[in-house]
Image (tube, helix red, strand yellow):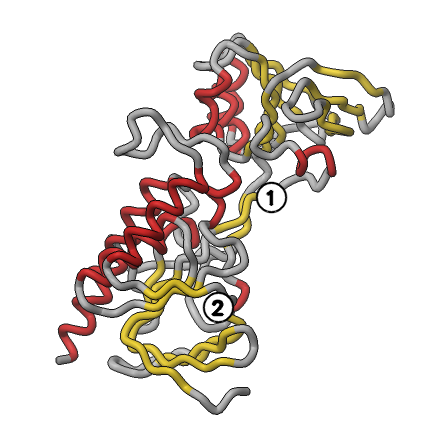
């Protein structure tokens, strides 16, 4: 462990829309924030080729370019952006206490406030063909990318409420939606199952799994296998929406911060406050309902304001 300890007012962990927006507001409030980006600078949005639903981009943009814009804006106001991973935390439970974090297993930083924006990682099937075509027709967010498949045929993989919601959303845009369910039943609520059944352009295949996503640079179809009969067949589609859940990136905070049974951080009321004074959470790490760039940015703003007010009350 390094003996050099750096003391700062505001530490931001994570670099997606929530982190960068928190940085913009915190730096404008003269909190002199330091951001550690994590291993994926820019977060999940950097895997999205086109972004058409973020305000201020009338002609659209791509996720990487948008994150670079936000980074440049945060740096213009004085945010220090560093590439690195937080590997350990020691949070004080006292109001006004100093919070310690370890960066890359060696550097120690002490902070008066910490804003956690580590996000959540979409769960994928793990197929090589699926991973290769993320951004080329494979997506984990129908509300983000569904527009680009207007009038086309797509598949949704999953059996829960999220899969049912994504399928019914896509059914309003796409010609046909096929839901692939691994078991012989859906786990979705009865209300969501009824909605699926009532939607004429949705078809459900049970006991069905994707064997391979077909296509070179873009999705051209899927090869599926019936896990009972072992029979394989192909479905011609241009989009594959994987809706089997997300995993919040909160392992490092287990036993320290309050979280739900899935691992999402719990914040108090309409604020971004966690159960520990001076620790705030924003973006997908505490939001399992919306998971949009614009809502993440909104909570990033809230977290910076909460941190500013917290420090102001201590003076």
Q: Is residue 290 visible?
A: no
Q: Quadrant of the N terminus?
A: bottom right
Task: Identify which residue is drawn at 19% across, 60% down.
Answer: 28
SS of the residue at dot 1? loop
| Residue in front for this viewpoint, 60 or 189 | 60
Q: Residue tagged by mark 2? A: 253
In the figure, is residue 167 to the left or right of 17?
Answer: right
Expressed as whole percent of the image width and height from the top left, the position of residue 44 reads 49, 45
Query: Percent x, y for residue 58?
Result: 29, 26
Q: Decide: marks 2, 1 in contact (CB < 8 A)? A: no
Residue 176 location, quadrant: top right
Q: Position of residue 259 (x, y in %)?
A: 45, 61
Q: Which residue is mark 1?
A: 123
Vertical order, 232 against 159 (above or below): above
Q: Please state, as top left, top right, bottom left or bottom right, where the C terminus lies in the image.
A: bottom left
Q: Residue at x 39, y 46 (%)?
A: 67
Secondary structure state at the residue bearing disc 2 = helix
């Amino acid at each position: 462990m390094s003996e050099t300890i750096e003391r700062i007012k505001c530490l931001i962990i994570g670099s997606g829309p929530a982190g960068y927006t928190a940085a913009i507001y915190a730096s404008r409030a003269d909190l002199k924030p330091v951001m550690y980006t994590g291993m994926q600078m820019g977060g999940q949005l950097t895997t999205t080729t086109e972004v058409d639903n973020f305000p201020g981009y009338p002609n659209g943009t791509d996720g990487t370019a948008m994150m670079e814009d936000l980074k440049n804006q945060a740096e213009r106001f004085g945010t220090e952006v560093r590439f690195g991973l937080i590997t350990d935390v020691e949070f004080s439970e006292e109001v006004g206490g100093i919070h310690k974090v370890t960066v890359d297993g060696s550097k120690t930083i002490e902070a008066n406030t910490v804003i956690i924006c580590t996000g959540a990682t979409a769960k994928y099937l793990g197929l090589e063909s699926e991973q290769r075509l993320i951004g080329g027709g494979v997506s984990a967010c129908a509300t983000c990318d569904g527009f680009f498949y207007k009038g086309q045929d797509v598949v949704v993989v999953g059996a829960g409420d999220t899969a049912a919601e994504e399928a019914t959303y896509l059914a309003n845009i796409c010609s046909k939606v096929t839901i692939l369910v691994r078991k012989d039943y859906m786990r979705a609520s009865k209300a969501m199952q009824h909605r699926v059944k009532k939607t004429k352009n949705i078809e459900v295949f049970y006991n069905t799994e994707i064997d391979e996503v077909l296509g070179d640079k873009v999705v051209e179809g899927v090869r599926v296998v019936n896990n009972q009969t072992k029979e394989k067949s192909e479905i011609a589609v241009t989009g594959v929406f994987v809706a089997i859940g997300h995993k919040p990136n909160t392992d490092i905070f287990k036993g320290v911060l309050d979280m739900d049974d899935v691992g999402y951080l719990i914040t108090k009321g309409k604020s971004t406050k966690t159960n520990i004074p001076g620790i705030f959470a924003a973006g997908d790490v505490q939001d399992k309902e919306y998971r949009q760039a614009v809502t993440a940015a909104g909570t990033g703003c809230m977290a910076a304001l909460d941190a500013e007010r917290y420090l102001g009350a201590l003076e």
